[in-house]
Amino acid sequence: MRSGHERILLMDYYLGNWRSLVDEIEKDSRDEKHLKTAIQWYENEASSRYGCQPQWNELLTCLLHKEPVIKNGVLEFDPVFHLLNPGLQSTFLQLLLHFRHVIPRSELLPFVRDIAQRCEGGETWLDVYVRMLAAHCQLSDFKGLSEGGQVEPYKFTPQNEERAAILCQQLAHVTVPPSQSTDKLDSKELPEAIEITEKMETEEPNVEEMTDSALESKEFPEPLNTDTKTSLMKLRECWQMECIDLPEEFSLFYTSTPDQVTDYCQILDFGTLTENAVVCAGQHLLTVSENMSHNNIVQFLQSALLKKLSENISRPLLGLLKKMGEEIPKPLVDGIFVPLVMSTDQCSSTTEIICKIMKESMQAKDLIYMVRKLNSIQQELTESHVSLYQTLVELKIPMEDEDLTTMLETLKRSSTNFSKNLKFGKLILATVNIYGDQMDKNHISILHQILQNHSSFLKKSIKSAVQKLTV
């Protein structure tokens, strides 16, 4: 039989483009950093035109490849996944959970079914990850969650019991279309639910897609129960005391839906907390951010931090935002930057804060995400928007042609309002100088249209730079 080292070498053979991920993970001995490393590796390789473009099917096929092992004197064939050390197993499962909504379910299902059949049904993190993946795949025929090999009956949380009763009453008269199987309604076959973000597209419930998210719908409002309120008050007290250790009650924020997180934040009333208490809460968020969904983090950030970003931002709060720019950049963009950018009363100081964080804390791929958010703005641009674009352009982020086109079109829409604005002229000139080499006829045409509306003293310099592109 092969040794562990030989199995890793053989696994390398099957891993293909995913080989370097294992190398990156093994460079850091700290298990708590492995998921972040894996996510960053995948995003870098998948988004870069020079990356290896790793395919999920390739990884899943490798992990299911069967290798011979001897157990109790009997020769068996186990998938490579089960021959890995628990740390690597955990990292792969967390990575699949993190990207579960972009992995084709048809590719993920065979892998989940195989490992779920071998699940011991315990309470280790590996068992929890397996159940979460099984729930996402709507897998209800695997062993391991009960002694009889059947999935245990679905257990409603206290918050959902009353809503479940209301939902069942409403579904009592629902007619199931012939093409849909009523077997899905058997509660004995429902896996333990996790947050499923797919939305109902029709007014009549789709029985196949009934998940815990249906129970969390705002159509069934329910006051928070006493236990939850008590936990939230303990959290508030903990933050007021600026406790460093992560309180157990914080698990509410990564085991609930975004709507529930919003309700929790209303009870916590962050606006009445001191800035130091809010910073403490933000530090706790960073501790568990890898276990939280993007939308949950966004809801938390909007509730906790937006009202604290005044003209005189403190050093601790700025430090927290910089750390978030490093560790949770996309939720920071959606939860803090976008609301500030869209605000009609945005002050110059908040713009400076955003620019500072983009310069000092965020990577190129996250800055591209920010550009795309700016490009999606439908309202007239303000000087704050121009300053943000200026910072992004000067950082020389590698924009795709489509992003560059959209940015120029966005600038063109407001070119009349900024006809004499020097900041706007400086932005156009910098864009031509930095991205001129990749501009095509369409880009140059948009620039000519912008120039027709521009009349600052920089117009001549811009026109000269554009003419050089056509030579």
Image (tube, rainbow, N blue to C red):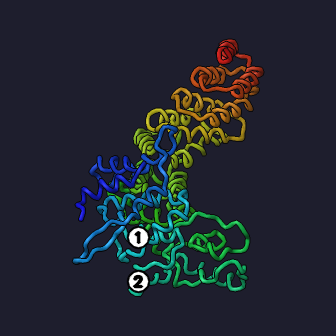
Q: Who's the residue at 38% across and 74% down the image?
A: 119
In this rendering, the count of numbered labels is 2
- 306 and 37: which is toward the camera: 37
State the mark number for residue 66.
none
Is the residue marked by circle 1 packed among few (<14), some (14-19), or many (20+) residues within 10 Å? Answer: many
| Nearer-the-camera pick, 113 or 405 | 113
On the image, which quarter does residue 372 sit in?
top right
Check disc 2: other Cα within 10 Å, few if <14, some if 14-19, many if 20+.
some
Q: Distance between the Cα atoms at labels 1 and 2?
A: 15 Å
Question: Which residue is labeled 2 in the image?
Answer: 146
Q: Residue at x 74, y 25 (%)?
A: 445
Q: Amino acid at mark 2?
A: Ser
**Looking at the figure, which quarter contains the C terminus?**
top right
Earlier along the polypeptide chain: callout 1 or callout 2? 1
Could you say which quadrant of the image residue 318 lies in? top left
Picture coordinates of residue 448, whole percent (x, y): 74, 22
Is disc 1 placed on a helix, strand or loop? Answer: helix
Q: Quadrant of the N terminus?
A: bottom left
Residue position marked by numbered label 1 in the rendering: 115
Image position of 447 with respect to 367: above or below? above
